[in-house]
Amino acid sequence: MSQNTIVKAQKLSEQISSALEERILSGIYPVGSRLPAERLLAEEFGVSRPPVRDALRTLATRGLTFSKPGGGHYVSEDLHTDFLSSWQSLIQRHDYLRQDVLDFRRHIEGTLAALAAERRTETDLARLQYWLLELEAAYERQDLVRQAEADVAFHQAIADAAHNTLFSHLAASLLLMIHRHTQSNLANMFSYTSAKEDLHGQHRAIFHAIASGEPDAAAAVARRHIDFVADTLQAAQEHIEREQISAALAEKDRKRRR
């Protein structure tokens, strides 16, 4: 093989790895998703399989992908792991940090909603509407797990509609962290009839402000939504704590009557 052939092959693999890396960062290939097979990528890029294989090795070396024996190549969770691992255990041990997270989320969600109102595409609106309808359908079925999933997906779609890669990945990490540590509280929040109706209206208002291209309105309704979520989660937590105290006192009474 000549030196020119080697250089050409290296440049091809670099171009392919760069293109794939951009797709990963932009969310076209989201975390946990499987990349197209080597054969399909080779056909798409109009090359043989060796440069595609080299490009995939490069992505794996950078920690962007990993492979499963006989199962293809997948986008690594490392894009979110560093952020999550730094904060998850702290939030679990210190309740006050959860309020700090929600306060931070209030400001970031307002910014994201405003940017989404300015930059959203018709495809973005279709995604938002899909998750809005999924969320409302889950409400009707009283499927608490699906409600929480659809809620996270709806807010992630807003972040993606802002068309800023850093915001999109930060939002994904933040939403995953909140979802993991407040899932039981989310279930309690969704179970409140009054909260359910308020959440319906808030999500619709955010969607309509973004669809109408009104950045200030979108930011305002997004911040009010997070304020409502924070207040409702706090009320749910206080209710759980009161129930635990009542149960402990009732158990104490039962022991006295024996």
Image (spheres, rainbow, N blue to C red):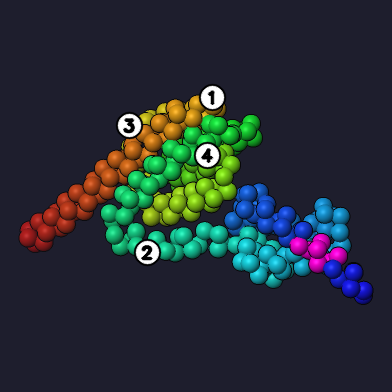
The tag earlier along the polypeptide, 3 or 1, is 3
**Which quadrant would residue 213 be assigned to in this image?**
top right
Residue 197: image location, x then y, percent: 38, 30
Measure how far apart labels 1 and 4 are at the Cα level: 14 Å
Name the mark on residue 158: 4
Whether tag 2 and tag 4 are in contact, CB under 8 A, the answer is no
Tell me the residue at 65%/61% (across/down). 74
Name the residue type under label 4: Ile
Please state the extent of the stretch shown in magenta in the rendering. Answer: 8-14
Residue to which mark 1 is pinned: 212
| Mark 3: secondary structure | helix
Q: Amino acid at mark 3?
A: Ser
Between 73 and 17, the one nearer to me in the picture:
17
Instruction: Work out whether mark 2 precedes mark 3 in sequence or the reverse, and give the earlier one.
Output: 2
Label 1: state its secondary structure.
loop
Residue position for label 3: 194
At mark 4, the secondary structure is: helix
Image coordinates for residue 96, horizontal then vertical, percent? 27, 54
Q: Residues within 10 Å of mark 2 (few under 14, many from 20)?
A: few
Q: Tell us which disc is closer to us: 3 or 1.
A: 1
Mark 3: give few (<14), some (14-19) or many (20+) Cα within 10 Å: few
Give the answer, above or below, for where 54 lies relative to 250.
Answer: below
Compared to 137, does 17 lie above or below? Answer: below
Residue at the right extreme of this rendering: 2
Q: Residue 89: which disc?
A: 2
- Badge 1 crowding class, 10 Å Cα cut-off, few under 14, some 14 to 19, many 20 or more, is few
Q: Amino acid at mark 2?
A: Ser
Q: Secondary structure at mark 2?
A: helix
